[in-house]
Image (spheres, helix red, strand yellow):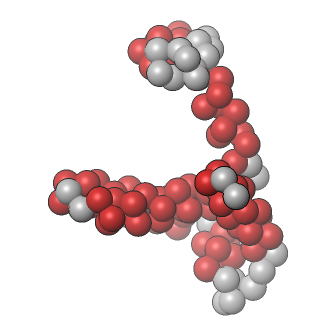
Amino acid sequence: MTHPDILFRLAETIEARKQSDPHASYVAKLLHEGRDKILKKIAEESAEVLLASKDGDSAHVVRETADLWFHCLVLLAHHNLKLEDVLDELRRREGVSGIDEKAARKAGGTAGQAG
């Protein structure tokens, strides 16, 4: 098993939980409560990543980053987007300077990848 496999399995589980009872599934509950609840969770998890990093606690950074990624996957599912959509965007940016890529977005173009 390669590490990215877990992201795909997790995304599949989240997708399957769309049909679950919100009283029996955390994911179903988040999706049922809607975008604002999901966004609130992402904001909370983002802040926790920042605080863990500021504290210099590597294990805590890993745990909080996992929570953040999980909630981002829930947000993608809310928008009927797939993990592959994000991975395709990262592939598109690969090998292109982040400065060039950002400038192209501001100009309305597509520079490719981040670097």
Identify the residue shown where x is 70% and y is 33%. 88
Identify the residue shown where x is 58% and y is 12%. 111
Query: Which of the 4 quarters of the picture holds residue 64?
Result: bottom left
Query: x%, y% of residue 100?
Result: 47, 11
Q: Residue furthest front?
A: 1
Query: Which of the 4 quarters of the picture holds residue 84?
Result: top right
* Left or right: 23 as drawn, with respect to 104: right
In what quadrant of the picture does the N terminus appear? bottom right
Identify the residue shown where x is 58% and y is 23%. 94
Query: Which of the 4 quarters of the picture holds residue 38?
Result: bottom right
Query: x%, y% of residue 109?
Result: 61, 11
Residue 115 visible to an observer of this rendering: yes
Is residue 37 or residue 100 the one in the foreground?
100
Q: Up-down: is 114 above or below 62?
A: above
Q: Up-down: is 16 above or below 106?
A: below
Query: x%, y% of residue 19?
Result: 81, 75
* Left or right: 94 as drawn, with respect to 9: left
Identify the residue shown where x is 74% and y is 48%. 82
